[in-house]
Image (cartoon, rainbow, N blue to C red):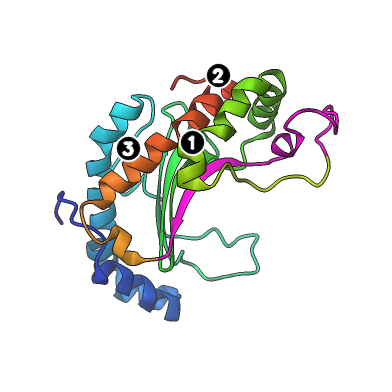
Amino acid sequence: MTDLFNGFGPDFWGFFADLKQNNDRQWFAVNKERYQRDVVAPVSAFISAIAPKLRQISPHYNADPRPNKGSMFRIYRDVRFSKDKRPYKEHAAAQFRHRRGRDAHAPGFYVHLEAGNIRYGGGIWLPPAQALGKIRQRILNKPQKWQAVIDDKNITARFGGIRGDGLKRPPRGFDAAAPHIEDIKRKSFFAMKDVSSAATAATAEFIDEVISAFEAATPLMYFISDAVGVEF
């Protein structure tokens, strides 16, 4: 393994292409060394390369290159309550969570690496009810600050705006006529860059591309961090 990040090349994508055709424990056991070499090693190197640049954006968001209990998501799927019993994820991903956050539902920056579906940016995904309520309440109480976020030129140019699935009706306690009610109805809040070409991530320059997107997402991250009471 090497700590030097040179991009996600053919071996990385080839592993997932083969896994997609052989998503079972027997195949994975035979190819586990390949997984460590072609997936874990470059993702860990990517996270190590991101770390000092992320600290310049915010010292409170962690980039931990450890394969276990670090920023890298495990490849194992939780199939206990799913009809889809495939045991392995067919993509790699990393989340750079706030140091106070312990799970994927904390504010964070995110990178998703899947053939034809590469995404990177920041936000919060399906936060627990208390945190979600605080974000919604801050949008209601600080409409001008929220307007500044959604009007931010970097957010609109880089991401096309704030996204996240929402409720069909206003959440309990919020008036349907309230300013920004469509945003208040959201269950997640994120600014994410979507690209389809693996060439985007094929060289070391991918680090700068991702960091540029993280920087563009900072108005949203500031707002969310303030809402849930953590430092940015």
Q: Is residue 180 magenta?
A: yes
Question: Where 55 sits versus 27, above or below?
Answer: above
Which residue is labeled 3 in the image? 63
Quarter of the figure with residue 208? top left
Quarter of the figure with residue 60? top left
Image spot of residue 166 (x, y percent): 72, 45
Q: Are marks 1 and 3 in contact (CB under 8 Å)?
A: no
Q: Quadrant of the N terminus?
A: bottom left
* Amino acid identity at mark 2: Gly
Describe residue 59's horizontal placement relative to residue 125 as left or right.
left
Residue name at image x 60 percent, y 69 percent: 84
Image spot of residue 144 (x, y percent): 64, 21
| Separation (CA) of disc 1 from disc 3 | 27 Å
Q: Residue furthest bottom?
A: 21
Image depth: mark 1 or mark 3 in front: 1
Instruction: Answer yes or no: is residue 70 visible.
Output: no
Which residues lie in the magenta part?
A: 170-196
Which residue is labeled 1 in the image? 153
